[in-house]
Amino acid sequence: MSLAHRPSDGTLAAFAAGRLDEGLALVVACHIEADTESRRRLRELEAVQGGLLDRAEPVAMAAGPRDALASAEAWPDSGRAAATPEAGTPQVLRPYELGPWRPIGLRIAMRRVAVPGADARVFMLRAGPGVALPHHKHTGFEWTTILAGAYEHEYGRYAAGDFDEADAEHDHTPRVDPVEGCTCIVALTGSVRLQGWLGRLLQPMVRF
């Protein structure tokens, strides 16, 4: 798998150190499961941090996405994750409760991912080919891993396995691939702010 978008060095280092909110970490783990290069970078960071930890007093750590990632089945040489009971669902999601798919708009559906104790809200989003989402920005983070299909916006095209790391400095208008559609997993902190006159009309209906 050849990817165009990966987590920043700071995000991957925070993931390796277990410093991310569990909801955000889960979306990063979904990307790492799909990408050989990010797994290689993660191992390098863990080796460096492991050397530092050898000099410190041991402290018990809570289980989370890093543990789910470590316990997944052996990675295929292709870099793609092994199949799970529901096609397209990352293995790292197995410990988490997934809600049913529910329509939230024309050819758009969402399912919630229960991550107890997380500050970020985590959900999977599925949109049909050619769907254009409203122009919007955020008051916090919006981290996304593409599970299938693709979308594009002002910052580039994001296809299966890519990681889209947006924050309050970004505003965008995602457009779903006209042939493949798109399925992704999203961790969201803060709130969504729809832009323009149409956004102001739709804002009261936005409940992520």
Image (tube, grey):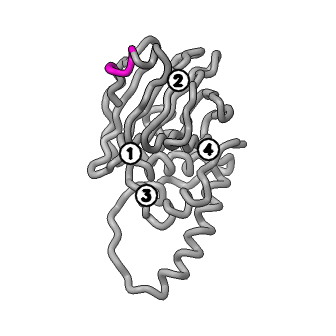
Measured in 3D between alpha carbons, the distance from the residue under mark 2 to the one under mark 3, in whole angstroms, is 28 Å
Measured in 3D between alpha carbons, the distance from the residue under mark 2 to the one under mark 1, in whole angstroms, is 33 Å
Residue at mark 2 = 135
What residue lies at 45% left-to-right and 28% top-to-bottom? 125
Tell me residue 94's x, y (percent).
Answer: 38, 45
Measured in 3D between alpha carbons, the distance from the residue under mark 4 to the one under mark 2, in whole angstroms, is 32 Å
Please rate how many residues cluster around mark 2, counting C-alpha atoms within 10 Å: few if below 14, some from 14 to 19, many from 20. Answer: some
Task: Report the amino acid beneath label 1.
Answer: Arg
Does 16 sit above or below residue 202? below
Please rate how many residues cluster around mark 4, counting C-alpha atoms within 10 Å: few if below 14, some from 14 to 19, many from 20. Answer: some
Question: Residue 60 lies in what quarter of the image?
Answer: bottom left
Residue at mark 4 = 80
Residue at mark 3 = 20
Whether residue 50 can be seen here: yes
Residue at mark 1 = 94
Task: Report the amino acid beneath label 3.
Answer: Leu
Whether residue 1 can be seen here: no
Q: Is residue 113 left or right of residue 12?
A: left
Q: Earlier in the sequence, mark 2 or mark 1?
A: 1
Mark toward the viewer: 3 or 1:
3
Please rate how many residues cluster around mark 1, counting C-alpha atoms within 10 Å: few if below 14, some from 14 to 19, many from 20. Answer: few
